[in-house]
Amino acid sequence: MRPTLRQRRRAALAAATTLLATFSVLPAATPASAAPALGKAQVWLTDLSTDTRLAKQAPVTWKAGPAPAGSSGSAITVDTRRAYQPMAGFGASFTDSSAWLVGTKLGNAQRNALMRDLFSRRDGIGLSFLRQPMGASDFSVSGNYSYDDLPAGQSDPTLAHFSVDHDRAYTIPLLKQAGRINPQLTVMTTPWSAPGWMKTSGSMVTGRLKPDAYQAYADYFAKFLKAYAAAGVPVRYVSPQNEPLYEPSTYPGMSLPADQEKTFVTGYLAPTLRKQGLSTGILGYDHNWDVTSYPESLYTDPAAAQSVAGTAWHCYAGDVTAQSVAHNDYPDKPAFQTECSGGTWEGDEQGGFAGTMDNVINGPRNWAQSIVRWNMALDSAGGPRNNGCDGCRPVVTVAQNADGTWSYTPTADYWGLAQASKFVQPGARRVASNTFGKGSVEDVAFTNPDGSTALVTYNSGTGARTFTVGWGNRHFSYTLPAGAAATFTWTGNQSGGTDPAAIGSVDVPFQNPDGSKALISYDSSLLAQQPQLRLGDQWLGYTLPTGASLTPPTGETALSRDVWQATASASSSDDPPSKAIDGDPATRWSLGHGMQPGDWFQVDLGSTQTLNQVVLDTTASSGDFVRQYEVSTSDDGTTWSKPIAIGAGSTVARILLPTTTARYIRVTNKASSGSWWSIHDLSVLAPDGKTTSSASATKGVQRRSAVLPDGTRLTAVYNSGGSTATFDVPWGDTTYSYRLPAGAAAIFTTRSA
């Protein structure tokens, strides 16, 4: 293993301390009280190509004045006056496998050194967030276990056999040690499965929660939280279920659809925690970016909205911008990124570092308050595994040496996390900055509680990049090698303003009845995430938070399907196109392969019809909806119109169209996904000519307008009231009616077609 600065300093110590020095991996950070020299920014660099790992570089000197003219194409502008979400921290999970390796295989000196390297802000990288499995996961040494296991056929509704003794051996001691080293540590816990006797499968593998077990399971959570607190590990957040839309067949898991999670949280878990005097927050969902309707559905109901503290996200499907979409839909609900594992699928160490830096930078840029990798530690074979991920990469590898001793080695995840966790304190606020995106210099900026600023940068391009950092009336330049990351830190207050166009986004603030703020932030990249329809020479865009609706001024009627014919670019042999239009929601058309741009589904209406909406329902195959759609029409099935509607799909995609006359409708997928595109039911609606009543604004509706740097006009509407609001949306000569749930926001955009 490579010696570091701190290792070299300790090399001269007595032989008894040599082993500890060999595996301590970081130099001490500059204390917050020791401010760097005025007029300079400190620099910490990781460049794996030169074996440089979180090494302090020569400071860069600020120059007077804004970034010089002509540097705008390579200038990162930081505006610390525009603040966003607070950061809870960065971290990973002491799975049963991780805790067993660290707690039982490493000797005392090695274990203490590792824990300092992980959690100390002075001597290590300052990790401050742990997401802990409640019972067995796919990384468990002890197989499948819960805290109340019984022989098959038996049950324990009073939880008389409940015990967390399994965790007392090596997990709880590590969590307590982490908390002592970093008193600002946040602990979250999540079950992979309820005890088998609570489930329809009778096992921790597969199955759903039995309806008569809801209260017992809520009590199970309360007992766990109290037991951990009594053991010295307070838990700040729980989520009801890890990856509730995935039911693994070989390791613990449990299906928990959104409606069942809502019932469990509002009717059982939240009331039980309150009754037991527990203030632990409940985070909803805890799954991938590709199904935003699940977490948002928890906010459409006032009781659920009050019970759920925020959304937990995973990174394995969809795009990180989903966090921004969901935030702007329900701007008062925070986001936490709670699991994102790297692995062999990323290639070599450089690929792993790139994946970690993408997570560290773009998670917070999209409102995440935490960045949590997966296993804190695994052995050199990526285990011990409990039939789970083959190839997952930990934060550190714990391996046995030739002499029989065990030692640890930091991985790419460690060094990637370090570029932020060492310098971004819990409670820091992300602040505004522009970024150049994939293939160039990416960045995210924060202001710490002590007033210092940290700018994390990563060059995801193939060549060195020179860029300028502008902050008020100061700037400096820096050249970052390809694949390298640099963190810049400085103190002081921003002097001088910032051109909003330099950041590229607009902030739209609203006020809640209690005086708190709800903030929407929007840039042009989010246009692709919202529905848009073409009216004349303009694209009119709108957002539809789950629970919201936008309806035309006349009523609608579903067209008869008696003579329809459906075709598709490809189909599964078991799921032909005709099953999407047979009126049976239990059947489906399925693409037969993972989604690729250009896949299409087409309906021949049999004759020319007038239509204004297409509805794609994938409820019975949640997660298999079209990722990005484009709708075109034709009179002959050969010559197609320009797209008349575009947008992001959802479980039930209600695609509003300009009133159109056509015989053929084609929906084309424009994005990639490993999921097979499915349609269980396709409906086409037409105006019925009956005028609907006009809506009037409801108390609590607030409106703000802004213009993006590219000229896109934006209007945001926020419902700060306690009930659903209805209001008119005038578009040209047509007025639509919008229904907006309490706590939700709608965004309307206009741009040239």
Image (cartoon, rainbow, N blue to C red):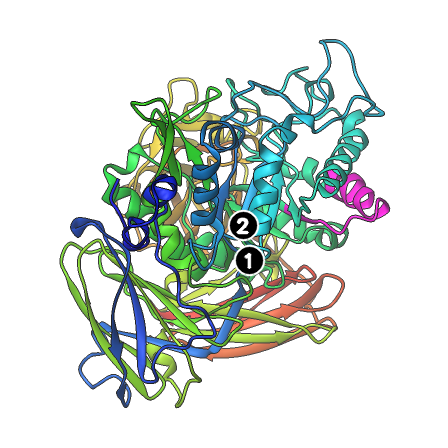
Under circle 1, the secondary element is: loop
Label 1 sits on residue: 88
Give the camera-side residue of 16 and 63: 16
Under circle 2, the secondary element is: strand
In reply to whether residue 268 is colored magenta, the answer given is yes
Say if 293 sits above or below 576 in the image: below
In reply to whether residue 139 is colored magenta, the answer given is no
Residue 743 sits in which quadrant? bottom right
Task: Look at the magenta stretch and give its main secondary structure.
Answer: helix
Give the camera-side residue of 240 and 114: 114
Report the span colored magenta. Answer: 263-283
Disc 2 residue type (three-letter): Phe
* Residue depicted at 39% across the width and 44% down the height: 663
Quadrant of the snapshot with the C terminus: bottom left
* Residue 698 falls left or right of residue 631: right
Label 2 sits on residue: 129
* Residue 279 falls left or right of residue 97: right
Q: Where residue 595 sits in the image (x, y, percent)?
A: 35, 36
Farthest residue toward the left? 463
Give the camera-side residue of 672 and 94: 94
Say if 728 sits above or below 596 in the image: below
